[in-house]
Each structure stands twice: as C-alpha cells, then as structure tokens.
Amino acid sequence: MGQTLFDKIWDSHRVMRIPDGPDVLYIDRHLIHEVTSPQAFNSLKDKGMKVFRPDRTFATCDHNTPTLHQDRPIEDPASAAAVAALAENTAANGIRYFPLGDPGNGIVHVMGPEQGIILCGQTVVCGDSHTATHGAFGNIAFGIGTSEVEMVFATQCLMQAKPKQARITVDGRLRPGVTPKDVILYIISRLGTGGCTGCFVEYSGEVFRNMSMEGRMTVCNMSIEMGAKGGLVAPDGTTFGYIRGRRFAPQAGEFEECVAKWKLLHTDEDAVFDKEYRFDAADIPPMITYGTNPGMGMPVYAEIPDSAVGCDEAGFGKALSYMGFGKGLRLEGFPIDYVFLGSCTNGRIEDFRAFASAVKGRRKAEGVTVWLVPGSKEVERMIEEEGIGDVLRTAGFELRQPGCSACLAMNADKIPEGKYAVSTSNRNFEGRQGYGARTILAGPLVAAEAAVTGRISVPLSYSASI
Amino acid sequence: MQKIITIHSPAVLVPTANIDTDQIIPARFLKTTSRDGFGRKLFYDWRYDADGSPVRDNIIDRQMYCPAAGENNAGPVRCRILVAGDNFGCGSSREHAAWAIADAGFKAVVSSSFADIFRNNALNNSLLPVQVSAAFLAALMSAIGADPALQVDIDLPSQTISAEGVGTERFAINGYKKECLMKGYSDIDYLMAHMDRIVGYEEEHRQMK
C-alpha cells in the first residue's frame, strides 16, 4: 500500500518509537513568540539548561504588541514585560529574534514563510494553534503547548502519537468573488468545529492546485478550526517559486537540489486515508459565520439555519443569543460596527490587494470603525510599494502596524461589548475579540463590502454564474 | 509531576459542547510569564461581569463545593472532576487552559472527545483527560444533574470510570502515558534520557535543512 505525503514526512522525522506509546519526532523549525514561551524558558533556566538547537528556532513578538506607535515603549506593563522577557531569553540562548519594528517582524505565521524560514517536507511547531498554516508548504506543522515548547527547547524533539488522516478534495473552479477564506469556512461549516479532531488533513484537488501560497496558507491556517491537528498541501511549482530567493531559504545550487527532493513529496496514488471528503468548487459561496464557533457558517445571502454540524441544541441557542440573532434571520443588509482586516489567516498581501480592489473608488462607511492590520512589516512594505496604501487612504481608511491585533484582543485593539465586527480572523468564540464582542468571520472581500456599506453584503465581484 | 492513581470525587458539570480555551481562560490573562495562579481566572467571563463583580449563581462556582456524602457531615467537599460536553478544549493551544483547570483543584476532565492539543497539555500537567462514549457521558450528565453530590470514581490502573446508577466504562490511554501519570514522570525526562538517539538521528540526517 502506498504512503501519504504525511506518512512520508512523519517517517523521515521519527527518531524512535516508544513501546506502547507515542513516537519521538525530530523538529526542523521551532517558531516562538512572547505569550507561550516565557514559562518554557523559565523551566529551562531552573534546570540550568540552554536551548539545544538555537539555529532551528526563530522568534518574533506579535500577540501582545500595539498596532499604533510601535516606535514608542509599549504602554501596557504586562505586555512590555512579556516582550522584554522574549528579547532577554532569545539573546541568552542565541536565538534569532525579530523585534518590534524590525523589517522581519510580524505575526509568526506570516513572517516565518516570508523570511524563507519555512521550507518543504519539514516538521514545524510553535506554541500557537495556527501553526497549521505552514502545512501550505507540504509540512507537518502543528500547534503545541508550553510544556512541549520546553521539550523542543531541550531536545529538538517532541513526543506525538501518530494521528489519523483525512483527505479533503475540492475540484472544479471557484466562482468569481469567492476567496480561499470562503473555501475553508465552507468546509468547516460542512464538517463541524470538531469534525476532524484526531486527524491530520491533506487538501487536494484543482482548487488548491490553482491557489496561490497565500491562499493555501489561509486554508491550512484554519484546519485547527475543525479540530484537525494540521492540514497540508503537496508542494509544487507554486510552492518552490514562493520560497526561491527568500532570506533564509537555501540559495542557488543548493536550492535546486532541495527542489529535486521536494518534488518527491506527494501522496502515492494507492495510499488510503481514514476519511475522505469531496466538495465541488461551484457550490462554494461567499461565507460568513453567524454563531460562536467557526463551524457555524453560511452563505452571506442565506438565512440562519436551525442547527449546525457538531453543535448540540443548547449550545446552538446559547450562541445565537450571545450574537443577538435568531433562527431564520437573514444577515445580508445587517448593520455592523467594526471591520477587522488582518491576522495570520488573512493579513497577507493578497488579502490587502483583494480588499483594496473592492474599495477602490468608493468611500469608507460613516460610523464604522475599520482596522486594517498588515500581518508583517514585509506586508506593510509591499502595501506601500504597490500603491495599495494610497488606494486605501483615498477611500478614507488608515493602516495600522503589524501584529495579531483584534484577532484575540490581547493588545488595545478590542471590540466593545455588544458590538458587531466583520473580521477576517479565524475565531468567533465568545469574548475572543473583547468582552462581549460579536464576531462575524468572513473573507477580505466581504470585509471590504462591509467597510464601505456598513452592512453585511455580498461582494460586488461575486457572480453566481461562472 | 504529581502522580495520579485514583480519583474519587463529586463533579462539576458543564454540559455544553465545544468549550474552547478562550472560555476556559480568556486571552487577556495570558500576559504573565509565570505558570501560577490561573485557577482564579478559570472560566472567568462565565463567573464575572465586565466590571469584575461575581455573576450570581454561575454554573462553575455554584458547583465547586459539594455537601459531604455520608453521615459524618464533614463539611463541603471540593470537586476534583470536571464533566463537560463533546470536543472539550478546542481552539487556542494555550496551556494556560490546562494550568487553570489544574490550579483550580481539578484532577480529571471527562468528555466524549478532547481537542488534540488540549489533551497533550492536560497530560503534561497531570490532569487526566477521560474520554468516554457519548452514551456514558449522557448518562453521567443526567445522573449528576439529578444528584449533584454523586461520587464519580476514576481508576487509572484499571482505566475505568464509574458512578452509582451509571455503571462502569473503560477508557483508553497508551501504556507509556499511563505509567508516566502513575509514577509522576514527565516526557521531557524521558527525552533527555535518550539524547544519544537524538544526536544519532541528527548525524544520519545531517543534510536535512
């Protein structure tokens, strides 16, 4: 029987098998940030140890950081202390750190690939569940807890039980105005917020083949939102083209040697998955969520359904009551208060291109607060270089500085209690964007439409016919 | 690591499915660089209003202590077991969620499924995730609903969970982890004892980037 891409990477990283226990996996890339690393550094310090392989570890600050006035000291003392601890710990251990304001700084899952830190066929971990993002390059990438961060610091290895495997195939062509975010929100709405728990997912089919790296990252990023340990896409010319020439990527002849090896990274034709799901691209509409988990999604123009996959009746009702919605309500035309473009899901240059293309020649809606937060300094640089910044400013928008921002509201970017926010981030959990905040997840085009109309609207570029 | 052998306690019942780690511990409490004291922040937004005043009769605090069973009337008993709906601990990988539950005095969480990262985080903190069938969970929930002082027994050596009127069910855990929990060993000690294997692997795969 053939092997899956996942099997091939797993097997080549297995250091040992523990009898009646998990495998010990070697970790190629360890990304760290200021929120989930300090306790691991402290434990290491208490044991008198240093990071075993600092050259495989890369650090950025993103979760706590302000998105305004990054040149000034961080105001919030707890955030400032967490960021200072990261600077100290990385310096003490010889770890490359991209501090606030550095051209390489940004959200860990945006800057990692941009800097060429993320290659193909690797194991990638980070104390952050959206580490699944890096599966877009054909990697086994997943989030870990702080005890596991400490294990990787100490040994460059992790103990993991091999998960089950699922394949999600989407063939056909996406309709105009449908983005990678809509694809993944659609899949999660069909499988449920816990639908892939215990599984690693491979995304296959025409839709993913035709997707840019940014799009693949958006899709893989949200694998965790259906419970999957991670998700990956087999690398191809698009992948190699993205990596080529990036700062930390192998250069010239060495790069070509790597590509020759990376071309072998695919699932064998006779490989068998534990679960197979198939969807048709033409069925995927522009999506929004209406509830308090990412599985509670529907077409922008639909009515709120009576139930959602994986939600019990009580939970479904509680979610609608938190959102101030009811069954059967149509959300198209519903007025909103905030729009957030950004996060490790949709804070990349393509998302800003999409948003700008939709708002060009139009005006920001009165009374709507719009936060446009680039995922990294590199995205910020490209926004200006491509003239997107001018388009946005002409339309009445302001850009903020890079970071996780309102996705999890650890900094000052909080959605006030009871307010509605159309967010391109990844989670609509109760309180996620601020105490009592009501999140409607969407892609960059739906966010753009909300920013100029002040209402939930179908993107102008959407066409129900192909 | 604390050892786990058996747990005998009444339970806190949270019958909701898909409880995410943002509910267990909101992100704004993650700024500290220490592991301690998160128990006070457990399910914070369910227990406190926006202005920080306690929510009366909230689902967590009203169940945290149970009247002692039996005749000796020894005063209220702290619950050591959390019983929750399906897909517990989904969302963010924050280990702070497991720290908060453990710091609040819980030794085990019972559900019909756990998010993968939460499960590992719990195990790394001697908090036992007990995965039971949907039918057993439903029966256990209704029994606790009828009698909040119901004693639940979890026995790690025999990998069983039982309660009067509900029955007994066996739960799965791999042999390695079971031994770690019963003896108080941690994964990091095991890995550190095998550094020669790790270095050997690196030498074999030297050209790997």
Image (cartoon, rainbow, N blue to C red):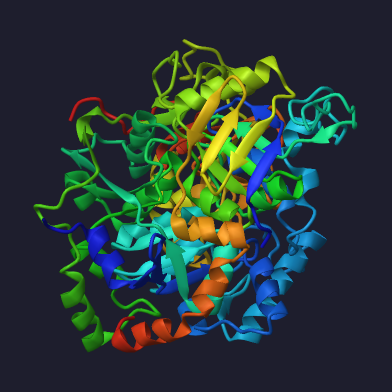
| In the displayed structure image, the side of residue A126 where residue A403 appears, left or right | right
Q: Residue at x 41, y 66 (%)?
A: A124
**Above or below for A422 versus B205:** above
Q: Please state the horizontal and vertical placement of residue A437, each as a whole percent of the image.
A: 66, 33
Residue at the far top in the pictured view = A328
Closer to us: A308 or A205? A308
Quadrant of the drawing holding the C terminus of chain A: top left
| Viewport quadrant of the N terminus of chain A | bottom left
Which of A316 and A389 lies nearest the eye of the viewer?
A316
Viewer-proximal residue among B173 and B109: B173
Q: Is residue A167 left or right of residue A34?
A: left
Residue B77 % position (x, y): 82, 34
Q: Work out whether A379 lies above or below A27.
A: above
- Tell me if A353 is positioned left or right of A91 in this view: left
Q: Quadrant of residue A418?
A: top right
Residue drawn at the location 18% of the way across and 46% of the way down: A205
